Image: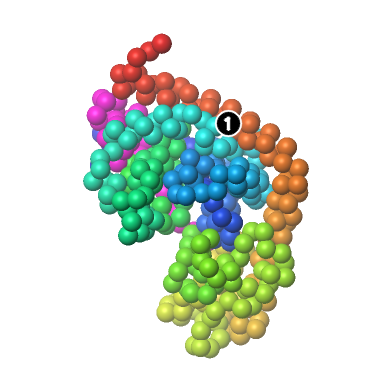
Amino acid sequence: MSEQTPYSGPQRILSGIQPTGNLHLGNYLGALKKFVDLQSAGWEGLYCVVDLHAITMPYDVPALKDQTRQIAAAMMACGLDPDESTIFVQSSVRAHTELAWIFNCVARMGWLEKMTQFKDKSGKDAERSSVGLFAYPVLQAADILVYKATHVPVGEDQKQHLELSRQVAARFNQQFGVPGFFPEPQPLIEGPGARIMSLKDGTKKMSKSDPAETSRINLIDDEATIAKKIKKAKTDTLGDMPETVEAMEGRPEVANLVGIYAALAGTSNEAVIEEFGGKGFGTFKPALADLAVAHLSPITTEMRRLLDDPAEIDRALAKGAEKANAVAEPIIEDVRKAVGFWQV
Ligand code: TRP
């Protein structure tokens, strides 16, 4: 569905990370590092820890606050600056839930029934899933649109949810006769590091829930662990490093390691192959391990420092909530008017 009157307001970014499980290299290269690059490029960005989303599945109540703080610490440790960007917790901006309710009445059951993530997460027992898990993408649309965000850096797996956000935006604009009110938010996915795969199976995404610890590098792993996991990463029996990018075809594990190297070094796969093509993994893997350690250990150290004295994180989140509220309030006010709510 395309807009007749396009949105013409300011461009801004919003993204969210769930406070569940440990962050790993895939989250770092696919999300956090991208956020920081976008901040450096001068984008206005809002980055939230999505605790409202975290309660759609069974969770540990006393642990939620600490996990929320950990994600905020990771955002800050990677280089998101609470003065330049807005770092906040989703539940501290009430407008998310209000807009989500209104969007629940805009989105159609059929749209949500298509969502593959719900099918995956609910498994065979969809009947016993929370209503919140079903409505999850509607809340995500509210996260984005309550700030009229135009661009959303996310992984491949969130493309379908973004598509739903565009549908909701277009239908809201049309249904309430406010053309161009909400933008149709676009994903920002491209670039090296968009999809980091398991170190044990190059066809599976690196995941928090993989039972094999050796399949992922956690942001809190120490240097020796990082180096060991990379040296033990699966390759294949097709010989040395490929001589061309085309020769990575059919070698998913090798392509993944090359992609990780390129993303960490800020170069392209071509440049990595130029340097390492034809060399043995005995040369490439230690170089990759050194690069990963050099890149991640300052982040780990900074995360630990922040978490040791969380006052700095909590101050940043308080300020972030204030800044986010200031953007969301006038927008939700306009929404209340558009949908005909009583004005007090
Ligand atoms: N669903 C996203 C994920 O699992 C997290 C998320 C929630 C999000 N709200 C968002 C991402 C808004 C981008 C924009 O990764």
Tell which residue pokes out farthest to the top in this image.
Answer: 344
Residue placed at 23% from the left, 46% from the top?
110
Quadrant containing the C terminus is top left
The answer to whether the residue bearing label 1 lies less than 8 angstroms from the nearest atom of ligand 1 is: no
Image location of residue 239, percent across then percent down: 53, 88
Secondary structure found at label 1: helix
To which quarter of the image does residue 56 belong? top left
Q: Is residue 307 magenta?
A: no
Q: Answer yes or no: is residue 129 visible.
A: yes
Q: Tell me how the rendering is colored.
A: rainbow
Image location of residue 52, percent across then percent down: 48, 40
Amino acid at dot 1 = Ala
How many marks the image carries: the answer is 1
| Residue density around tag 1, few if under 14, some if 14–19, many if 20 or more, within 10 Å | many
Quadrant containing the N terminus is top left
Front-most of residues 324 and 117? 117
The vertical placement of 25 against 255, above or below, is: above
Q: Which residues are magenta?
A: 167-193
Tell which residue pokes out farthest to the front in this image.
Answer: 128
Residue placed at 45% from the left, 33% from the top?
96
Image location of residue 284, percent across then percent down: 63, 78
The vertical placement of 245 against 71, above or below, is: below
Residue placed at 25% from the left, 30% from the top?
174
The vertical placement of 32 against 336, above or below, is: below
Residue ID for mark 1: 321
Residue placed at 73% from the left, 52% from the top?
304
Q: Answer yes or no: is residue 80 visible.
A: no
Q: Is residue 177 magenta?
A: yes
Image location of residue 287, percent across then percent down: 67, 74
Front-most of residues 6 and 233? 233
